[in-house]
Structure formats: C-alpha cells, structure tokens
Image: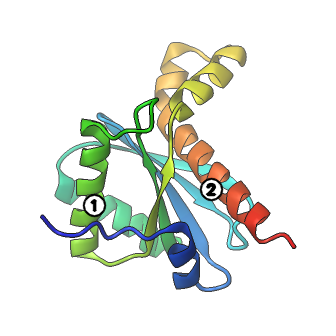
Amino acid sequence: MAADPTLSLDDFLAALPPFGRLIGIDLGTKNIGLALSDSRRSIASPLETIRHKKFTADADRLLSVVAEHEVVGLVIGLPLNMDGTEGPRAQGTRAFARNLTARKPVPMTYWDERLSTVAVTRTLLEADASRARRDEVVDKMAAAYILQGFLDRIAHSMTP
C-alpha cells in the first residue's frame, strides 16, 4: 500500500503560497460535498455536491473544480469514530486521498469531521428546511463546516 500523501497541519501550511483558495471535502458514501474558501482563507462557502459514480469520474470533477477555482490545497474531512479511532470510512477516505494524489499531486491535509453532518443537519432542521432541501445541501454545507473549522484553527494559530 502506498504511503498516505496528506501532510501534517504545519507541513500543509508550509507547502501553501501565502494566498490562495482551499477546498474542503466531505467524502460521504453517496456524495462528495465541496466547499471553497476565499483567497485569504478566512471564509468557507458551500460550493457543490458531486454524486458518487466511480472514482475516475469523481476525481475528474474534483480536479476540474480545483483548476477552475485555482485551488492551492485540499482539506479532507476524516471521519473518525467518536473515540478517535479510525474505522472503514476513514480507511476509505485515506484511499481516496492516495488515489487522487496519484492522478494530480495537490497539497492536502485531513481535518476531524466528527459530527459535522449532525451539526449541519440540526441547523437545517432549525431553519425548517424540507427533507428534500436538506438532502440537496447537507453534503456541501458539511464540507463548509469542515473547512471553516480548519480556517478558524489556522487563523488562531497565526495570531500573535
């Protein structure tokens, strides 16, 4: 098995230019949610949902979005178990990252995504969103939740 291509937080930040957009990825079983940061990396916005097909089609679409928005790095939600261990979904996420890097090397790191979909679903329920609307937006909103958590963390780590 190939080595995990993702970088630690410090190595990821060192690999990035001072400015440039990041994409947050919520890799679900049926969909891939994408969120995009601004070039100063302060705000994450839901971008789109890719319906899972096959890896090649999914990767092609993701890499197309990376090129279209001039993305400099990927923040991939890592679905850890509540006790912090990794299960089959985390292993699948790591395999996705390895396979994606084989197609096009892009700096990437993981971000703990525990409860991101739960938090977003709760917010949508509080907003009285219909089930159809929730199903339509939950994945890209979860990606935004993941990416915003990452952006908030790096903003705090860079504050004197």
- The percent coordinates of residue 79 (x first, y second) are 41, 40
Which residue is found at the position 72% from the left and 19% from the top?
Answer: 127
User: Element type at marker 1?
Assistant: helix
- The percent coordinates of residue 123 (x first, y second) are 67, 24
Quarter that holds the C terminus: bottom right
Q: Residue furthest right?
A: 160
- The percent coordinates of residue 16 (x first, y second) are 56, 81
Q: What's under tag 2, amino acid-wise?
A: Phe
User: Element type at marker 2?
Assistant: helix
Q: Quickly name the residue at label 2.
A: 150
Which residue is found at the position 78% from the left and 61% from the top?
Answer: 156
Which residue is found at the position 56% from the left and 67% from the top?
Answer: 22
Q: Earlier in the sequence, mark 2 or mark 1?
A: 1
Which residue is found at the position 19% from the left and 54% from the top?
Answer: 55
Q: Is residue 70 visible?
A: no
149 horizontally vs 74: left or right: right
Pick the residue in front: 114 or 35: 114
Q: Residue furthest left?
A: 1
Within 10 angstroms of label 2, few (less than 14), some, or many (20 or more) residues? many
Q: What's under tag 1, amino acid-wise?
A: Ala
Q: Quickly name the residue at label 1.
A: 59
- The percent coordinates of residue 71 (x first, y second) are 51, 73
Quarter that holds the N terminus: bottom left
Q: Pointer 2 and pointer 1: residues touching (CB < 8 Å)? A: no
73 horizontally vs 52: left or right: right
Pick the residue in front: 137 or 27: 27
The picture quadrant where one finds residue 42 is: bottom right
Within 10 angstroms of label 1, few (less than 14), some, or many (20 or more) residues? many
Q: Give the mark toward the camera: 2 or 1.
A: 2
| Mark 2–mark 1 distance (CA, rounded to whole Å) | 22 Å
